[in-house]
Amino acid sequence: MQEALNAIEQGSIKKKISDIRVGDTVRVHQRIKEGKKERVQIFEGLVISYRNSGGVGAVITVRKVASGVGVEKTWFVNSPNVVKIQITKRSKVRRAVLSYMRSRSGKSARMAERDFDRNTANESDERTPDQLAEAEQAEIASEDSAKASTDELNQVEESTDTLAKEENKLASKDDATGDEAPKDKTVDEQINTDGEDEAQLPAEEFRAGVDKVQK
């Protein structure tokens, strides 16, 4: 039973979460469904509590002051409704829970800011192992389809080249047979096919008739 629960928990943990710490000012992008529509709402505030960090039950509490009224919201970091968490500022703190911030306002609520690598701290991958597996399967399927289409295109090109070569061979054979004179033709016809003037034979016959008359 415990192994099944552990497997479910491991499948629900996101691959990588931003390096969130107590005292950070964050922007939580929350997915909200309204009927068939879906939108993302951003809640920006101070992290006053971060419990069970690194586990499937990691919980973050963010506080902000809106119109003089303190508002707090709590999320499960690994919840699919939490799209991403961006860290905008990091402050120096000495406590694990900043509950005293609830009684402070104005200048007394200000905290000393500290430098940090924003790009490194905000590196995250909100996908779960199941989502990563689905993405890999989809990528493999797309590669296979692309390869199949490429192979089909190559086959079409090869068949086209083969047809073109066969047509060229037939055309060359037709040209060769058309230039040669048929063997069953008479000598006079062969002379004409060899390129002799068509008027040559009638002229010779006329001369032969004139010679006979003179004789």
Image: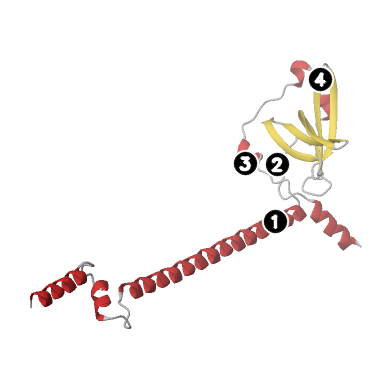
Q: Which amino acid lies under the numbered mark 2 shown in the image of this protein?
A: Ser
What residue is drawn where x is 88% and y is 36%? 35
Residue 204: x and y, percent?
16, 72
- Give the CA separation, mark 1 to mark 2: 26 Å
Q: Regarding mark 1 in the picture, which secondary structure is present there?
A: helix
Q: Quadrant of residue 58?
A: top right
Q: Regarding mark 4 in the picture, which secondary structure is present there?
A: strand
Q: Disc 2 or 4, which lies upstream in sequence?
A: 2
Q: Which mark is residue 18?
A: 2
What residue is drawn where x is 81% and y is 44%? 80
Q: Which mark is residue 91?
A: none
Q: Which residue is mark 3?
A: 120
- Is 206 above or below relative to 183? above
Q: Regarding mark 3 in the picture, which secondary structure is present there?
A: helix
What residue is drawn where x is 57% and y is 64%? 151
Q: Disc 1 or 2, which lies upstream in sequence?
A: 2
Q: Which amino acid lies under the numbered mark 3 shown in the image of this protein?
A: Thr
User: Foreground: 152 or 6?
Assistant: 152
- Give the CA separation, mark 2 to mark 4: 25 Å
From where the camera sits, is residue 24 visible? no
Residue 103: x and y, percent?
85, 22
Q: Which amino acid lies under the numbered mark 4 shown in the image of this protein?
A: Ala
Q: Regarding mark 2 in the picture, which secondary structure is present there?
A: loop
Q: For the N terminus, which image quadrant?
A: bottom right
Q: Disc 4 or 1, which lies upstream in sequence?
A: 4
User: Foreground: 71 or 115?
Assistant: 71
Q: Which residue is mark 1?
A: 138
Residue 176: x and y, percent?
33, 74
Q: In front of the other: label 1 or label 2?
A: 1
Q: Quadrant of residue 94?
A: top right
Q: Which residue is mark 4?
A: 66
